Image: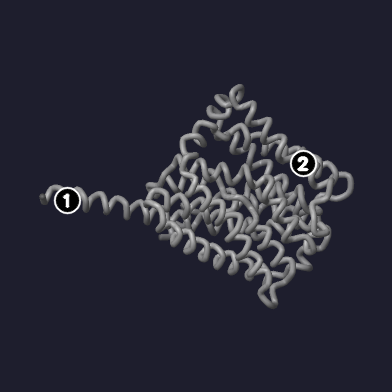
Amino acid sequence: MIARLRGALDPFIVALLGVVALASVLPARGAMAGVVDLAANAGIVLLFFLHGAKLSREAILAGAGNWRLHLAVLGTTFLAFPLLGLAMAAIPGIPPLVGIGLLFLTLLPSTVQSSIAFTSIAGGNVAAAVCSASFSNLIGIVVTPLLASALMGQGSGMAGGISLGAVEKIMAQLLAPFVIGHLARPLIGAFVSRHRQAITLVDRGSILLVVYSAFGAAVVGGLWHRLPPSSLVLILGLCCALLALVLGLTWALGRAFKREDAIVLLFCGSKKSLASGVPIARVLFPAAQVGALILPVMLFHQIQLIACAFIARALSRSAGARVGAGTSGDGAR
């Protein structure tokens, strides 16, 4: 069990924690803060350009016909999750920073790579998983800011609506690079496919830079004075509870689908994207707030990887046992 747990741990989270520690001890200040801020903005643009370039139109078309499944995934991601986030943020005694961070977490799109990987391990419909996860991320570029505006207006300083400046940043740093990257896929798609490992390093490097910038600004603004260790423990517990609730919900809803599609709903519908969440928070909210907002996202990311790794392996063994039982039954006849 320890070996499995070690295999489920994401080395990227270790790097993230290192960056948080560095930003807590040596945050960028003065002129250097401006340089880091500019580099973080450039990193976000590059990140979403690469997201667009990696989006396979063929894979989406292959699984696009299963519209009932995709609607179920989107409903879980952008309806059920936010309702749970609102309920948790309204729990009496929840510190405001914790409540806002948890609510923001629930507004994010699903992951892509891990959702597809776990669906494949568990014997699910991989083409549909690619389609659902990609739809979720594409729609999330627009839907997540809209939900944040509607549900987080007072707590986030957005004054109950998205300002013109926020719209411009969403277009310039998120949507336009994504669209350009996808349109450029016929020219650079082969290069991206050949250098997936290097592209992943660039992706993760961009996120680490944004995290350093966000946490540095938050630390300068007094983050750790406003968020004591007890709040971190509370966030961890609430993230575990949130994931358990959504896993139970998606598995129950999956009874309306065949097994391969139920697995897609389980993994695509229960995940939240760190890769999208960090830059979206950086674009939408003041720098001093971003550090607190992405703490739940970072913790939930690791928890979902560990839990889903165990679940995917259990489903894989279950599928193997069913095939074996079927084969034995055929032989008995």
Residue at horizontal 44 percent and vertical 62 percent from the top: 252
Q: Is residue 193 left or right of residue 264?
A: right
Residue at horizontal 27 percent and vertical 53 percent from the top: 322
Q: State which tag comes first along the sequence, 1 or 2.
A: 2
Which quadrant would the N terminus be assigned to in this image?
A: bottom left
The residue beneath circle 2 is 41
Rendered view: 24 above or below 170: below
**Closer to viewer: mark 1 or mark 2:** 1
Q: Amino acid at mark 2?
A: Asn
Residue 224 position by quadrant: bottom right
Q: Amino acid at mark 1?
A: Ser
Residue nearest the viewer, comparing 315 with 228: 315
Image location (x, y in percent) of residue 115: 50, 48
Residue nearest the viewer, comparing 19 with 123: 123
Q: Is residue 297 left or right of residue 133?
A: right
Residue nearest the viewer, comparing 263 with 38: 263
Residue 199 position by quadrant: top right
**Residue 114: mark:** none
Residue 169 position by quadrant: top right
Mark 2: give few (<14), some (14-19) or many (20+) Cα within 10 Å. many
Image location (x, y in percent) of residue 71: 53, 50
Residue at horizontal 76 percent and vertical 47 percent from the top: 283
The residue beneath circle 1 is 328
